[in-house]
Image (cartoon, rainbow, N blue to C red):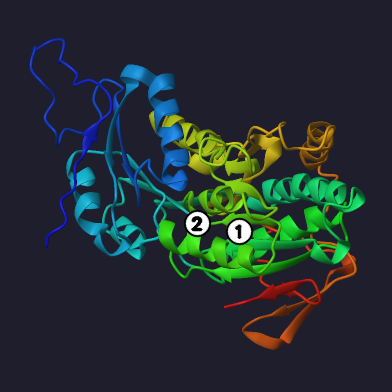
């Protein structure tokens, strides 16, 4: 069955003042109006895409009649070519995607007058890329560490008050794929936990799908059944949060979210969430095009060639609402202090008495006693080691 795409025009159609007729869909930028395209791998029903659309809405609010926005939703990576070409034909001067299709980069080669901006999904530091192709990402390890700190404070309180025994301080983590993005995130999370609850260990369960509510929920349920008392995630749906809320009547379990606040679906178990804030990059990139400037020289962040990243300091990542009904009193103050340390460059995450092993090459190991700097060369995470004695990968 042929997939049908629906393009939505997010701003009003504009009248030509002098002639009184509508812009042609294929007309280029006119009178300072820039056509901006978005391609989403899902729709707003998934936290990952919902979070990304917040930047689209912020762009419309900030630029109003200076931009005209077109968006395609629920686009499979293998089917990116058709909607992407339609956006090009409509005269979009810049196009963003939160998907991971290689077609996006390939089509950029044959359309040098259009700027293509894609969320990073591989390390671009040693790759030859088209001059009009750009990648970007928030430094997710920062908010995952603070997520872990909130969970660790909760675990410490549960241990100290006899709710669980030290050996029961087991965390479950639901990840998409065994790639550096996920490995870096769950490592940062665990190190945040262990900064206050060093007894904690982690079990990881992969879904092997970018976005699957069913698989993510099932992975969380498996981890809960194995005795995990906190479930965290580097995955795209609400599945793990719902699994925790459903299991709470029979288990002591709390949830830490990703991409959006999950209190609506898990009001008694969701402790906190963190997210990438895509708005600074998207608005900065659009502003650069409107002013005829280089994107990387206009956007505030760390530049890696035509790839950019940033963390709390540039507001590219942020913490969402803490659930004070279940959080330990004083948690918010400690989280604020950690965020401030990140902003000042004073908090080293990947450091400690740990040895990590590359799951694909046992001969590749790392000693974290001297520390490791994440996102040093690329917006895509590079830490890919499994910490020994405290992290178990189940599948």
**Circle 2 or circle 1, nearest the eye:** 2
Residue 174 at x, y percent in the picture? 58, 62
Is residue 42 shown above or below 318?
Answer: below
Q: Disc 2 designates what residue? A: 120
Q: Earlier in the sequence, mark 2 or mark 1?
A: 2
Q: CA distance from mark 2 to mark 1?
A: 9 Å
Q: Residue at x 69, y 62 (%)?
A: 228
Q: Which mark is residue 338?
A: none
Between 234 and 58, which is closer to the camera in this rendering? 234
For this orientation, the residue located farthest to the bottom is: 363
Whether the residues at callouts 2 and 1 have beta carbons within 8 Å, the answer is yes
Between 194 and 102, which is closer to the camera in this rendering? 194
| Dot 1 crowding, Cα within 10 Å, few <14, some 14–19, many 20+ | many
Q: Does residue 346 appear left or right of residue 364 in this picture?
A: right
Q: Disc 1 designates what residue? A: 378
Residue 211 appears in the picture as rendered: no
Q: Quadrant of residue 334?
A: top right
User: Dividing the image into 4 quarters, which one contains the C terminus?
Assistant: bottom right
User: Dividing the image into 4 quarters, which one contains the N terminus?
Assistant: bottom left
């Amino acid at each position: 069955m042929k997939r049908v795409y629906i393009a939505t025009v997010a701003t009003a159609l504009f009248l030509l003042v002098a002639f009184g007729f509508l812009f042609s869909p294929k007309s280029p930028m006119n009178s300072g109006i820039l056509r901006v395209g978005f391609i989403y791998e899902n729709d707003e029903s998934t936290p990952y895409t919902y979070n990304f659309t917040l930047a689209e809405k912020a762009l419309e609010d900030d630029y109003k009649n200076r931009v005209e926005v077109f968006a395609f939703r629920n686009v499979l990576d293998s089917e990116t070519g058709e909607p992407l070409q339609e956006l090009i034909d409509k005269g979009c001067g810049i196009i963003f995607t939160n998907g991971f299709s290689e077609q996006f980069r390939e089509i950029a080669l044959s359309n040098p007058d259009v700027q293509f901006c894609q969320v990073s999904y591989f390390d671009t530091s040693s790759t030859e890329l088209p001059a009009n192709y750009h990648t970007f990402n928030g430094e997710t390890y920062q908010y995952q560490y603070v997520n872990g700190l909130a969970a660790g404070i909760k675990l410490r309180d549960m241990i100290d008050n006899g709710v669980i025994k030290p050996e029961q301080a087991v965390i479950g983590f639901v990840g998409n794929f065994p790639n550096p993005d996920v490995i870096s995130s769950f490592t940062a999370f665990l190190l945040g936990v262990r900064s206050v609850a060093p007894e904690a260990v982690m079990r990881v369960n992969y879904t092997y799908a970018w976005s699957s509510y069913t698989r993510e929920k099932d992975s969380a349920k498996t981890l809960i059944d194995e005795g995990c008392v906190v479930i965290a995630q580097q995955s795209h749906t609400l599945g793990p949060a719902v699994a925790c809320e459903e299991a709470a009547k029979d288990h002591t379990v709390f949830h830490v979210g990703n991409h959006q606040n999950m209190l609506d679906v898990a009001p008694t178990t969701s402790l906190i969430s963190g997210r990438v804030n895509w708005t600074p990059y998207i608005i900065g990139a659009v502003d650069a095009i409107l002013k005829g400037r280089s994107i990387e020289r206009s956007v505030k962040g760390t530049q890696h060639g035509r790839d950019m990243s940033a963390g709390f300091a540039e507001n590219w990542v942020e913490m969402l609402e803490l659930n004070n009904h279940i959080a330990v009193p004083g948690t918010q103050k400690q989280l604020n202090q950690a965020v401030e340390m990140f902003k000042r460059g004073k908090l080293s995450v990947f450091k400690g008495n740990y040895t990590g092993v590359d799951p694909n090459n046992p001969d590749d190991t790392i000693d974290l006693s001297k520390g490791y700097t994440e996102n040093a060369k690329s917006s895509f995470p590079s830490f890919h080691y499994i910490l020994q004695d405290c992290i178990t990968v189940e599948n």
